[in-house]
Image: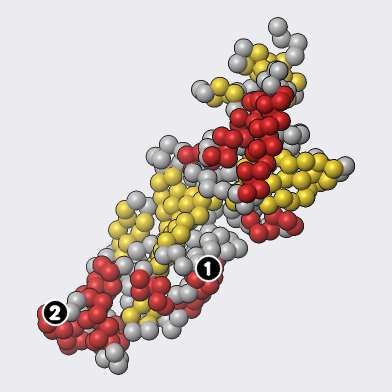
Amino acid sequence: MCGRYSGVVHEVATPVSVAEKAAVQKLLRKQGAKEEFVRRFGTSAASKDEFERIIRDGDMVTFFAYLVVEGPAMRVEWEVRDRTNLSYENSSVALYVFAGVWFASVNGSRLSTAVTYSTPRKAVEKLEGHLKYVKEGWYRPSCGVYRSARSAEGLKHISADAADEIVSKLTSLNRPINHGESAQCFFLWGEVDADEPYFDSYHDEVGKMVHKVQTLKAAKGKKAEYLKASQGLKEFLNNSGYQRLMFRRGEPGFRGAADSVVMRVGFSVRGNLLPYRGKWIRMVHDEQYGFNLFLLVKEIEMPRSVSRDLLKAVGPYEEGDLEDWQGSRVPPHWDEMEVNGKRCRMVDDEWKPYESK
């Protein structure tokens, strides 16, 4: 039998075979198994008695109940919610370990001692691409969150490198998560188009400084203040870990001084953005020499509440794209945009064609 809840299939009420009972008895009779059971699931005399009872009865269901309550050694999942958080679905793979033996559960499926693995890598070999997210229809949002979590037990048995490989194999993405020593990691994917520049969101300290410089550049009679603020911004960025990288003139999203964009770097990127693969970055105009454009670049934090409302820094644009309830979404120093194929300017807080009065 199986049940379904929130789009996830759960195996329930499946009889335990004689072979499974024998397998759990063999597993729990391994050297050190009793000590591990007591260490992980309780140190009382009752726990020791329970351990002996499970062996005697071949009680696989109760044994796995202990594992499930404790939680998997590693769990990888994707979760999808649309922008209103109404549409929801997920898919997951959970890895459990006991006495050096690994078990895998897909979308909450029934664990069994009849299917075991010697390493966590082998446990996911047949699940390659299982968590690959595919947009199959209009009802499924094109974005989602990948999560990976290792328990205290998982951190003992699954190295950061192994965790990276497991996530890559399950998602068919090129190392979307760099686990390091972190127990829990997440990766937002598909919220925006990768390798596409978006106008700076101004959501953090540097963003607010960028917006101030752009506003001064757009204001009349503020040249001296603009130059001072611009120089202060560049000094702050250089002292804050921003890297000076060279690009070719005409880099999308850059018209001149004070320009700034944010970008989700894709996994196929090459060249000087390779170290930022899969990350959000900010790119700020520094200076230009001939055909060479120099930008100040650094990885940034990008909240989903911000990323889902960004505006591409490269058109084409249609009527209504450039404004929202807060006003213009275009940098204040950009005084000309092309909308519906027409050159437009800001008139009374609206982008209107030049021929308009």
Instruction: Name the side, left or right, on which 214 lies relative to 44.
Output: right
Q: Quadrant of residue 174?
A: bottom right
Q: Residue at x 58, y 37 (%)?
A: 207
As shown in the figure, which amino acid type bears the numbered disc 1? Answer: Asp
Where is residue 286 shown, x and y percent of the image? 73, 42
On residue 330, the disc is none
Seen from the viewer's position, the closer of residues 137 and 258 is 258
**Dot 1 lies on which element?**
helix
In the displayed structure, 298 sits above or below 323; it is below
Mark 2 neighbour class, 10 Å CA radius: few under 14, some 14 to 19, many 20 or more? few
As shown in the figure, which amino acid type bears the numbered disc 2? Answer: Ser
**Outermost residue, bottom side:** 31
Q: Residue at x 56, y 60 (%)?
A: 176
**Dot 2 lies on which element?**
loop
Q: Quadrant of the C terminus?
A: top right
**Outermost residue, top side:** 357
On residue 164, the disc is 1
Q: Is residue 105 visible?
A: no
Marked residue nearer the N-terminal end (2 or 1): 2
Mark 1 neighbour class, 10 Å CA radius: few under 14, some 14 to 19, many 20 or more? some
Residue highlighted by disc 2? 44
Instruction: Name the side, left or right, on which 11 lies relative to 277.
Output: left
In the displayed structure, 245 sits above or below 155; it is above
Where is residue 26 shown, x and y percent of the image? 29, 90
Where is residue 140 shown, x and y percent of the image? 49, 45
Q: Residue at x 67, y 41 (%)?
A: 234
Where is residue 134 shown, x and y percent of the image? 54, 53
Q: Quadrant of the N terminus?
A: bottom left
Q: Residue at x 26, y 91 (%)?
A: 29
